[in-house]
Image (cartoon, coloured by chain):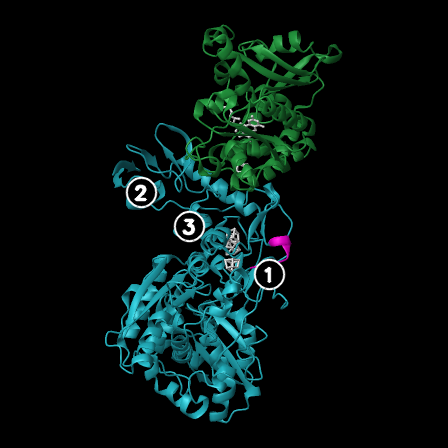
Amino acid sequence: MIKATINNVEIEAPEGTSILWAAKKAGFTIPTLCNHPDLKPGGQCGICVVEIEGIPGLKRACMTPVGEGFKVKTHTPRIMATRRQLVELILSNHDTDCLTCVKNNNCELQQLASIVGINVHDYSRSGERLPIDRSSVSIVRDPNKCILCGRCIQVCSNVQTVDALAVNHRGFDTVITTAFDAGLGNSVCINCGQCVVHCPVGALYEKSATEEVWEALHDPDKFVVVQEAPAVRVMLGEEFGMPTGSLVSGKMHAALRRLGFDAVLETNFTADLTIMEEGTELIDRLTSGRNLPLITSCSPGWIKFMETYFHDMIPHMSTAKSPQQMFGALAKTYYAEVKGIDPGKIVSVSIMPCTAKKFECQRPEMNASGYQDVDYVLTTREIGRMMREAGLDVKEMPDEPPDDILGDYTGAATIFGATGGVMEAAVRSAYRLVTGKELENVEIKPVRGLQGIKEAEIDIDGTRVKVAVAHSCGQARKLLNKVQDQIAKEGKSEYQFIEVMACPGGCVGGGGQSWGSNMAKRARRGESLYEEDRSLPLRRSHENPSVLALYEKFLEKPNSEKAHKLLHTHYYKRSTVDGKIKPAS
Amino acid sequence: MMLAGYAVGAAKGFIYIRGEYALSIERLEKAITQARLYGLLGENILESGFSFDLAVMKGAGAYVCGEETALIESLEGKRGHPRNKPPYPVTEGLWGKPTVVNNVETLANVPEIIRNGAAWYRGYGTDKCPGTKVYTIIGNVATPGLIEAEMGTTLRDIIYEYAGGIKEGKKFKGALVGGAAGAFMGPEMLDAKMDFVNLKEYAAVLGSGAILVMDESTDIVGMLQSVLHFFKHESCGHCVPCRLGTKQLVEIVDRIAGGKGKVEDIESLVKISEVMRDTSFCPLGQSLNLPISSSLKYFRDEVYGRVQQPA
Ligand SMILES: Cc1cc2nc3c(=O)[nH]c(=O)nc-3n(C[C@H](O)[C@H](O)[C@H](O)COP(=O)(O)O)c2cc1C
Ligand code: SF4
Ligand code: SF4
Ligand code: SF4
Ligand code: SF4
């Protein structure tokens, strides 16, 4: 342990602790801008400088380890003046139109300017306006707001290993851009939105669909159905100031109903359905021994990553669509049929913790119903904005259930939102499918939690199934490299079933979550999902009565021909240069 | 470099040189090929059991790539951005391995010291700063060029003895010593002894050993202008103070040079360069305060004379 003082407060900290964290221990939050708790410090902004007695000059608190006997001062007149100057310099090259900015009230630069007390602009505004990159269907990039903190590059390159973004030019002309300046939509970007949720300012945000959804809601000719992803119910409360991870399933249904949706349904319903389809696929593969391991397919960021960097694994992929797209295909077929609604008049909206879902719903093959299956995807942030505009506060809502035939769900569906959840849900049902018996203890703890790659061996009545779970594409890359290696060397992999989620933490860490994300928050949301699972009367997907009814009345059985047509898909090879589909050779 | 490699137990050395210096590269490569032919480089050099080889690496010419950690990034094929220190290159350098980075001049001193002994080398220069220094003398002198002089030689001797004095018999006005990020000196510094230790006392540096001599007709604001433009051009853009500070400094100095400057503009120059000194990520941005503060130290009246006087 190292002993030091921060503004005369004595502290003890393990060796290697940065002054920034040591100061937190002493009760002082040193302001920062580029630093993020889940990323390595890059030292770009210089805001966190402190004075250390006996050491000349100022030192960056984020990257200076606290040393034995250090006497650190965090807000001397010199430091405060310096910070103010730095913030003024940042503002000299920043489009400071906060009122029209997506980050207004949630912006780290705005907060910093207020903390250090900026009340005049000392420096001339410099720099020309740069074009806004709107080439992606998921994400908008506004370089005029960018402060070059480097967080987006770090998360895209180091955490996701996608490498869609890089620094270009130098000095004052430095910008962050994509390969050949072609824009995110023409790059290897997988639309995961991790850059968006790590950006401290309004330089990265989702491509909003709120206007289109308002229009549909106000159109008396349209029948607007809405589905909500598992993770949204533990995120939406944060949009209304509730503690992180507050579980608001019932309040969410109530608020959506009040917003004017004609039917409030559930992605959780199709999550249960996914398990029936994917579970059946797993049993088939285990029986035939072909194309093992089976790899899950419900994360559209992961799908594009796989298509770009691992397309030789396509035969291993589950062909099951994601729950969002299964829902879309059923809403304009089964639902329309049962309810007697013209599918052409149905507008299908989904509320997602995710930006990649915006890309997914626009993939050309996602039209099994004869229409675009899902019309609009809104992130949690967007639906929060719409609810606020309509004067709705989720906190104040009563608890209401979803509407019928695509609304019921089990605990197995709700845990889809956390890393390991799909795996756990699949095992609960695969056990039944193989043995005819119910798995007594449904909680499979080794696949839960936020450590990198999780492994477990599951005994299905004598058959041992080795499974692995990866969250974040960087971890997926590691795991798949290992699998490829094993297949090349030994003809088969040690794993039979693999779950991959593109985002760290799974969907609770998606690119559509509320601003101000970090791993601790993702963990808390995950815990809330497991809590809902425990509280539900049914916890196995194959027990969902509405799913059973769907098979009975419409699809016949899992993996039937009709199920294949509506609920399964195929994949492409993509270029590692521009992310576009490569023509089949 | 082989001696340095032997001393630290390295098997591989890199010479990092600007791509534009085609002639130097050609000569270096020729020398390396010849050394290999004579068995002076490669496996088991002269049966000594010591193996060492050299490679010439071409840089794209960014000034910041002279900073040792940016140089290493560039060698690794990345953008020339400086790294945080610590860890220093001697613990984690090229590809994460311990690496020693030295200047050519430093390395060139080593064979002579080994051949003639340390006492011989210490016979040159001053007590506190023994040895010699290579200077590049440019500007308004009769014979510009490269010289090697003992540590402690005065600026006057360097200009008048080695470089043939000021061109066209004009008067000496000042010098920019230590490269673009060095310090301006006025006539009162002509008799200062030039060595690392002594110059520190005058808040100046020897730096690269470049001495730019200015005659009486030189415009100090114009000099400052070219220094600041150079730094704005060479800032790598990684950190806020340097990326945005250099831009503001250039705007201000251009305003002063254009006759539109105010007294507050001079104060801003100082203020911004102090923030840059204190908070820039690497020595490039940190060093810009020196030319600004020294120009005001020796040529204060001239600079203040160029801004609009308060009514
Ligand atoms: C911005 C900047 C540019 C530099 N450029 C050079 C250079 O061109 N050549 C050089 O030898 N050293 C240059 N240096 C110094 C080197 O980083 C390094 O300190 C030096 O070469 C170490 O050698 P020495 O210890 O033998 O003097 C530069 C330093 C900075 C901060
Ligand atoms: S990024 Fe922040 S400071 Fe900049 S305009 Fe948006 S809200 Fe304001
Ligand atoms: S959305 Fe994901 S893949 Fe695309 S640039 Fe951002 S972090 Fe990279
Ligand atoms: S886009 Fe955002 S995260 Fe990326 S460098 Fe700019 S400010 Fe930082
Ligand atoms: S001071 Fe900062 S911007 Fe300037 S060269 Fe160094 S790291 Fe780059």
Residue named by callout 3: A39
Amino acid type of the residue that numbered disc 1 sits on in the rendered structure: Ser
The mark that comes first in sequence, 3 or 2, is: 2
- Please, which chain is the residue tagged with disc 2 on? A
- Give the residues in magenta: A179-188
Residue named by callout 2: A22
Which quarter of the figure is the C terminus of chain B placed in? top right
Badge 3 and badge 2 in a common chain: yes
Foreground label between 3 and 2 = 3
Contact flag, marks 3 and 2 (Cβ < 8 Å): no
Q: Which chain is green?
A: B
- Please, which chain is the residue tagged with disc 3 on? A
Label 3: element kind: loop
Question: Is residue A496 among the parts visible in the rendering?
Answer: yes
Q: Give the Cα distance between marks 1 and 2.
A: 46 Å
Residue A369 x, y percent position in the rendering: 54, 84
Contact flag, marks 1 and 2 (Cβ < 8 Å): no
Q: Give the Cα distance between marks 1 and 3.
A: 29 Å
Badge 1 and badge 2 in a common chain: yes
Residue B284 x, y percent position in the rendering: 54, 32
Residue at 41% of width from left, 77% of height from top?
A284
Residue named by callout 1: A575
Label 1: element kind: loop
Give the quarter the ligand 1 occupies: top right
The picture quadrant where one finds residue A439 is bottom left
Residue A476 x, y percent position in the rendering: 43, 60
The one of A259 and B159 positioned closer to us in this rendering = B159
Within 10 Å of the Cα at label 1, are there few (<14), some (14-19), or many (20+) other Cα atoms?
A: some
- Colour for chain A in the figure: cyan
- Residue A296 within the magenta-colored segment of the rendering: no
